[in-house]
Amino acid sequence: MAKLFGFSIEDNEPLSPGVLSPVPQNSEDGSDFYLSSGFFGSYVDIEGVYRTEFDLIKRYREMALHPECDSAIEDIVNEAIVSDTNDSPVSIELSNLNASDGIKKKIREEFKHILELLDFDRKSHEIYRNWYIDGRLYYHKVIDLKNPQEGIQELRYIDAKKMRYVRQQKQTEKDKKAYRLANINVDDPMNYEFPEIEEYFVYNPKMTYPTTNPSSLGGTGGIKFSRDSITYCTSGLVDRNKGSTLSYLHKAIKSLNQLRMIEDSLVIYRLSRAPERRIFYIDVGNLPKVKAEQYLRDVMMRYRNKMVYDANTGEIRDDKKFMAMLEDFWLPRREGGRGTEISTLPGGQNLGEITDIEYFKKKLYRSLNVPPSRMDGEGGFNLGRSSEILRDEVKFSKFVARLRKRFSYMFNDMLKTQLILKNIITPEDWELMDEHIQYDFLYDNHFAELKDAELLNERLNMVQVAEPYVGKYFSQDYLRRKILRQTDEEILEQDKIMKKEIKDGIIPDPNAPVDPMTGMPLDQTAQMDLGQPVMEPNIDAQGAATEADGKIAEMPKGGEI
């Protein structure tokens, strides 16, 4: 076994020896074991669709060149990848991740670095389109093998036709003469000894033709890459009978071939049936057969006039040397017939019928999961209620969301490698964090926008109806959770923002007193103006009050009040 190129990330926590199963671990792409004695990538296709993975990818790429198929692919890619002048097509979402702010910040920085290595802002459309057509995507994660802690230095795209994923049984001394899947101990049915499976990639830069010889791929004709040094993202569709990964274009192969044959036959029929042709019945009397044929030929050459238009020179000339299949018919008629006669064969009567073409075109679009209403731009987008949107558009939006989920596996693999190489996290940490890391794609689906706006409008109307019953039948918390459908995180976040905006004076305080006259909230910071205050006289035994005449008044002494 030749040494693998690249690097490997080892898991420090193997499974417990008590974890047993009689079923071997399977790969998510459906590929089974390739025994070292067997052929690599060889499949038997009874229907004649494909024999090797090479033929399969080649057929997919040929299908993408067909106009109808290309239009459907562009609809899918444009819905999935939305390019904006300001925002990136995809961003990472870590709200569900239970980690410190410092770790989240580093994860966001490394994800931004990965997008820069991919040049995803400019090449996102091509990357997604290649993945969708081929059904698989390969990227080589180039690192500095002397300083792996510096992370990924470059991400290089690899043509799917030149790369193969191999799961091969390792050769041991026990398995040199006989290759067995498992050694079963009859006394202990749970004691299955599964062979050790090695996973690697084989890159053949000169792979321009299919091959089924594993020695040519793993020997001088190819380079073996370790599993962790290659990012491998598949479509998720698997032909489990043959153990091969398929593209979403696979089920459209038959529909596309039918559409091509119907279109070709329609063209041939119209070319052959479009012109009106004449039948000349020539009376040859009692002439012998040879002389009758000569006489018929002389008459035909005498009256036949074939005008030919030369597209190169623009000339019209008489060309009697050639007789095409669309010209007139000349038939002899013996004595006793009706003499020389000329009749006309009508042209095709139903040349405008294209119902079958439309049927197979709609069938092709349905096989590609694209709504037939998008065909040829028919049916404008309805900006009304979401209830008026076709069911096909709902299914299509869910299909695109599913494709995005699958495509994000590529980001997951690259991010995992980057974080582990830079010692930000450990492989064990990634197993816990993996399912909580989400990727937020830019959305341009108008149906989803209309649906969200209409749902919000209906919820606000329900809140308005139920508000008089708050404190009597419902609580404020009940309205926010059950009617507005706010989560705990959204409630806390909105309360915090509203408190800050009230403090800053952006929005009024709903609990502030209201002026009954104007209905406006009262300003509690301003003091009420009640006129000039009336001061009590300061009567002092030693002081005296001045009168108008300037005399000093004396304090009264004694007496009754």
Image (cartoon, rainbow, N blue to C red):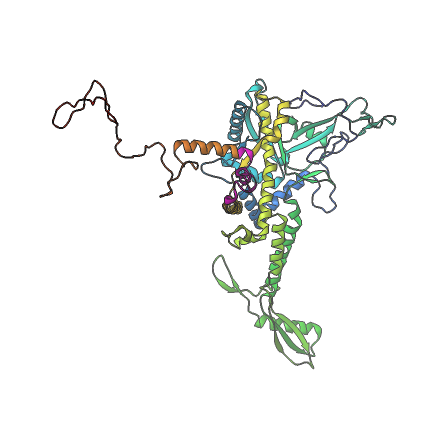
Q: Position of residue 408 (x, y in %)?
A: 59, 34
Q: Nearer the viewer, residue 227 or 346?
A: 227
**Front one among 150 and 457:** 457
Q: Is residue 245 magenta?
A: no
Task: Point out the residue furthest to the front here.
Answer: 560
Total number of numbered discs in the rendering: 0
Q: Position of residue 473 (x, y in %)?
A: 55, 42
Image point 64% across, 49% down: which residue? 367
Residue range highlighted in magenta = 467-490
Q: Is residue 453 left or right of residue 523?
A: right
Residue 400 in percent (x, y) is at 58, 43
Place of residue 232 in the rendered image (x, y in percent of width and height, measured from the top left):
63, 32
Q: Is the residue 290 above or below the residue 156 in the image? A: below
Quadrant assignment, res 514: top left
Is residue 483 magenta-colored?
yes
Relative vertical location of residue 14 with respect to residue 133 in this rendering, above or below: above
Residue 503 shown left or right of residue 294 in the figure? left
Q: Is residue 78 visible?
A: yes
Q: Quadrant of the N terminus?
A: top right
| Observer-nearest of 195 and 462 | 462
Q: Is residue 221 visible?
A: no
In the current view of this chain or complex, which residue is farthest to the right? 187
Rendered-image quadrant of the C terminus: top left
Classify residue 186 by image quadrant: top right
